[in-house]
Image (cartoon, rainbow, N blue to C red):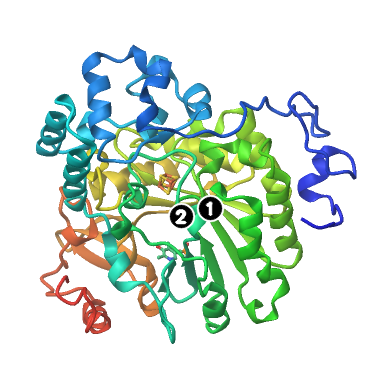
Amino acid sequence: MEDQPNTGGALSDTGSDTLRQPVAGDTLPSGHMVPQSIGRYRALTARHLDEIPQLGKLSADDQFAMRVVSSVLPFRSNRYVIENLIDWDRVPDDPLYQITFPQREMLRDEDFARMADLVARDATTGEINEAANEIRVGLNPHPAGQRELNIPESDEGVLEGLQHKYRETVLFFPSHGQTCHAYCTFCFRWAQFVGDKDLKIVAKEETGLHQYLAAHPDVSDLLVTGGDPMIMKASSMERFLRPFIDDPSLGHIQDIRIGTKSLTFWPHRFVNDEDADDMLRLLEDLTEAGKHVAIMAHFNHWQELETEVAREAIRRLRNTGAVIRCQAPLLAHINDSSDVWSRMWREQVRLGMIPYYMFVERDTGARHYFEVPLERAWEIFAGALNQVSGLGRTVRGPSMSATPGKVEVLGVQEVHGEKVFVLRFLQGRNPDWVGRPFFAKFDPAATWFDHLEPAFGESKFFFEDDFRGMLKGTAMADAV
Ligand SMILES: *Cc1c(COP(=O)(O)O)cnc(C)c1O
Ligand code: SF4
């Protein structure tokens, strides 16, 4: 990047005007020591399972199961996750192990048996891939009408790599940000990682992002997402984000959000990576230009916040003027307990971050393994909320990103003798739906919005006619 004055903020931690990257062992003015780097980032994938000595602790059966599952669902990890986040004495129950390593039960029995047979008899890569693709198609790779409904069009045609579902916010999927420093076993974007072009939503380089935004004055927020955009080089991020400083036709874009799990999977991104300071300087330039920069950080468990390098990365990001908001899905085997959430929210607040959303796991991929009934999800949420102070109660949820909108479960209540779910839209395809409580019949087994039916004998939810009208003429018209 060209000469930019050091305005303090992100880089003032170095304690000097020269932008020397702090090195491991330096003591910063804050009194914190710069954590040891563990070298350059290197992905460990299904091909490298043999290079992970810690897996030697597993039984031969479990090692085989891991090979089977990782030929269908994406697997990627790295040394930081393996050496610093996972407590191998607690495997297989350790939450970070569950977040990143494939487990046998993540495939349905018949799918597992089919793939196990192929792997056991050393089938060809072609045979394995063909079976894997068939199994994937059965796992609802694009939940909530992502492909059919939300891709905007311009005069030049469909704008791949953009999604515009809610009036204020446009999602952008930069083509270089479509992978992550590690993969989550529960990821609803998993389809993008398995190399099947048909399953990808990705921006081409010549994307019309800036033109689209310039032409839509109603939009106030850009949400850069992926994959994980923080996998990109700072120079690539510059290309997309610098125009928000320089180009007056983008002045209505107030908020730049970047969704990332890099604070968990590779906090070195903001501390020791070659272009860590360039990335921080870009964020700082955006905040100084008057933009609100929000890092939408994905944390599932307080264990992700415990390492010195994660804390240093959080400090450095906050020094840019960016705000870190935290969101994550609720998942069986990982964080289905109020105590885990309340401890995580307290820790987030202590580190200067803002709890934002608790999501219900989407209806895709290995959902049967992770799903939690809505009633239980609400109990966990409420049980965690009442353990934290008001500063942690900024969080909302449990929230389902369903086709009509984001629907929050406000609770379970009895109204005139009928047990009901009380719900409300946090986001709606029509903004008028937001904030109005509505009711669904109580169902102890319901795990997702499409399991719910209107309460009090009504034949439809208040938004349904409006919603159906919006779907007319789309590929989704028959689906609801
Ligand atoms: C969640 C989400 C947003 C952002 O919603 P906020 O409530 O503003 O955080 C935007 N677009 C889509 C498609 C979403 O799912
Ligand atoms: S970091 Fe986000 S996009 Fe990447 S695998 Fe995890 S949930 Fe999916």
For badge 1, the amino acid type reads: Pro
Above-or-below relation of 122 to 8: above
| Mark linked to residue 226 | 2
Please tell me whether mark 1 sits on a helix, a strand or a loop: helix
Residue 228 shown left or right of residue 137 in the figure: right
- Total tally of numbered discs in the picture: 2
Q: Position of residue 271 (x, y in %)?
A: 68, 37
Left or right of 270 in this view: 424: left
Cβ–Cβ under 8 Å for marks 1 and 2: yes
- Of all residues, the one furthest to the right in this rendering is 17
Q: In the figure, residue 19 lies in which quadrant?
A: top right
For the C terminus, which image quadrant? bottom left
Q: Nearer the viewer, residue 48 or 400?
A: 48
| Residue at 16% across, 43% down | 131
Residue 164 horizontal/vertical position (percent): 42, 72
Q: Is 23 left, or right, of 157 in this rendering?
A: right
Amino acid beneath label 2? Gly
Q: Nearer the viewer, residue 182 or 442?
A: 182
The one nearer the camera, 378 or 188, is 188
Say which quarter of the image contains residue 433: bottom left
The vertical placement of 115 against 148, above or below, is above
Secondary structure beneath label 2: loop
User: Alpha carbon of mark 1 to alpha carbon of mark 2: how far?
Assistant: 6 Å
Q: For disc 2, does the CB lie below 8 Å from ligand 2?
A: yes
Residue drawn at x 48%, y 42% as measured from the top left: 299
Which dot marks residue 407? none
Q: Position of residue 3 (x, y in %)?
A: 85, 56
What residue is pinned by disc 1?
A: 229
Name the foreground residue: 419 vs 462: 462
